[in-house]
Amino acid sequence: MSIYFNKKILFTIMRSCLHIAVYIALGLLLAFLINGKVYAAELNELDNPLYINEETAIESMTLEENPDTGWLLITSFVDNTGYSHRLAGVFFEVRSTFGDALITLVLTDNFGEAGLELPVGDYYVREVSVPVGFQLNPSRVYFTVSDGRFTEIVTQSVPIPEPLIQPEQEQPAPQGRLIITNKAHGTGYVLQGAVFDVRRAIDDVFTAQITANQFGEASVMLIQGSRDNRGKPGE
């Protein structure tokens, strides 16, 4: 009975010691993890000035994910507005300076802005489409993208001038030339000095009087319409 009782006490003591050892090990592991996190944070503060809090830490990590890229921001304004009126709906193409390869197309939003992330390098942008009422400017704007930096390009679109309204001018009535050739009956010789009255056929209004020259011809410019010519008696 005594031996059985002693074994039971010994088993209880050993189990208690095992629990204590487990608790101590867990405590040491937790302390190690906490100290390691604090130490890592201290190293980050020394190596990276941006690491101040959780938000800046995330920002710092984002910058390091793409170490060879930068950002481009294009802002389009309406010309002669003092940079107060931004223009939406302008398409720009972005091309590499070397090789002239098309990188992408961007469109300005309601704030007149278009932005994108680009690999470090040399590029140019130019307008390829503008809203109705504006002139397309095909000029190239060169720029360089640097690591982790913003590059801003400001453009101005020129409105198409309204055409000047010219006052309506009265168009001259169409005219034609009347030529009379006066020849002698039978012989066909031209006769000089014959005088002709030209009158409007519809109402017999006098229009002009012409005389045959040395070639037997008499001519006059007349407004389009029907005319009647009459040689004066005795001539």
Image (cartoon, rainbow, N blue to C red):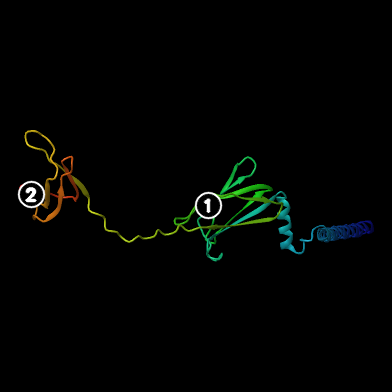
Left or right? Give the position of 207 relative to 27: left
Q: Residues within 10 Å of mark 2 (few under 14, many from 20)?
A: few
Residue 15 image point, x, y percent: 87, 58
Marks 2 and 1, Cα distance to the nearest angstrom?
A: 72 Å
Question: What residue would you read off at disc 2?
Answer: 232
Which residue is nearer to you in this view: 4 or 147?
Answer: 147
User: Mark number for residue 26?
Assistant: none
Instruction: Please name the residue shown 64% across and 44% down the image.
Output: 97
* Quadrant of the snapshot with the N terminus: bottom right
Residue 158 in view of the camera: yes
Q: Amino acid at mark 1?
A: Asn
Pick whichever, 105 or 225, lies toward us: 225
Q: Dot 1 lies on which element?
A: loop
In primary-sequence order, the first of circles 2 and 1 is 1
Of 64 and 68, nearer the camera is: 68
On screen, residue 5 versus residue 190, left or right, reads right
The residue at the point 56 percent across, 50 percent down is 139
Question: Which of the 4 image quadrants contains residue 11?
Answer: bottom right
**Is residue 227 at all visible to an observer of this figure?**
no
Please, what secondary structure does the residue beneath circle 2 have? Answer: loop
Give the class, few, some or many, for how many residues have Cα within 10 Å of label 1's Cα (few <14, many ≥20): some
Give how far across and how far down residue 229 sits, in percent.
Answer: 10, 48
x and y percent of residue 78 in the render? 52, 61
